[in-house]
Image (cartoon, rainbow, N blue to C red):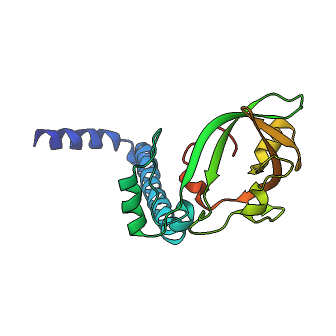
């Protein structure tokens, strides 16, 4: 009861000069209501986007990640019983243009199987089917890369990029990747 009386005392003092002193309170109240309404609208938009595009953001219905180990035979058998399965391996590495003057850059490597992606499609420019992208020519396998990598190392389509002791020919640029949205944090271009 005492706190309520103290609150009324403060309110009466603030109102001595009329509503003029009450402006800051009203401004803060308005700002608070606007912020709460804005956050509610943003939350609804995110939920609607996930409901409509959730599968393509993950590249399937469920994504299971194992860090620094492979799935056991029992785990793979269980997952295969649940539905169609695609295996993707990712790692970070240093890449450089073969014979180029540019330096090295950190990249995110992704190796995919023949079932990838389970939902959606990988779009490339120029458009190529995965077997054509990754097929070896003159003993060198192909790769699809993000456009950012080309800019960082000064490469073009047809150039060779070195990752460790391996060499790859850049065949196409990835323009859309279905499961790209599930990578919350990436250290380098793909």
Q: Image height check: is 77 above or below 147?
A: below
The image shows residue 138 at horizontal and vertical percentages of: 87, 48
Q: Is residue 103 left or right of residue 64?
A: right
Q: How many labels does the image show?
A: 0
Residue at the spot 45% in from the left edge and 41% down from the top edge:
69
Q: Residue 151 versus residue 157: which sits nearer the camera?
A: 157
113 relative to 147, above or below: below
* Residue at image point 39% right, 42% down: 17
Residue 23 appearing in the image: yes
Which residue lies at the image location 79% right of the left edge and 61% below the top edge? 132
Residue 174 is situated, as x and y percent measured from the top left of the image, at 74, 56
Q: Is residue 186 visible?
A: no
**Observer-nearest residue: 53 or 123?**
123
* Farthest residue, direction left: 1
Q: Is residue 105 above or below residue 21?
A: above
Residue 1, horizontal then vertical, whole percent: 10, 43
């Amino acid at each position: 009861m005492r706190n309520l009386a103290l609150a009324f005392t403060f309110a009466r003092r603030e109102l001595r000069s009329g509503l003029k002193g009450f402006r800051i309170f009203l401004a803060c109240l308005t700002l608070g209501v606007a912020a709460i309404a804005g956050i509610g609208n943003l939350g609804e938009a995110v939920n609607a986007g996930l409901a409509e595009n959730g599968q393509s953001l993950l590249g399937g219905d469920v994504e299971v990640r194992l860090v620094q180990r492979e799935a056991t035979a029992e785990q793979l058998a269980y997952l295969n019983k649940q539905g169609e399965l695609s295996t993707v391996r990712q790692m970070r590495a240093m890449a450089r243009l073969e014979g180029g003057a540019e330096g090295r850059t950190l990249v995110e490597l992704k190796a995919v199987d023949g079932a990838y992606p389970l939902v959606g499609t990988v779009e490339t420019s120029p458009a190529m089917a995965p077997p054509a992208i990754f097929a070896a020519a003159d003993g060198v396998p192909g790769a699809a890369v993000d456009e950012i990598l080309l800019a960082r190392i000064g490469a073009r389509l047809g150039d060779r990029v070195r990752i460790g002791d391996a060499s790859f020919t850049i065949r196409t640029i990835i323009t859309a990747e279905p499961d790209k949205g599930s990578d919350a944090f990436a250290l380098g271009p793909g």
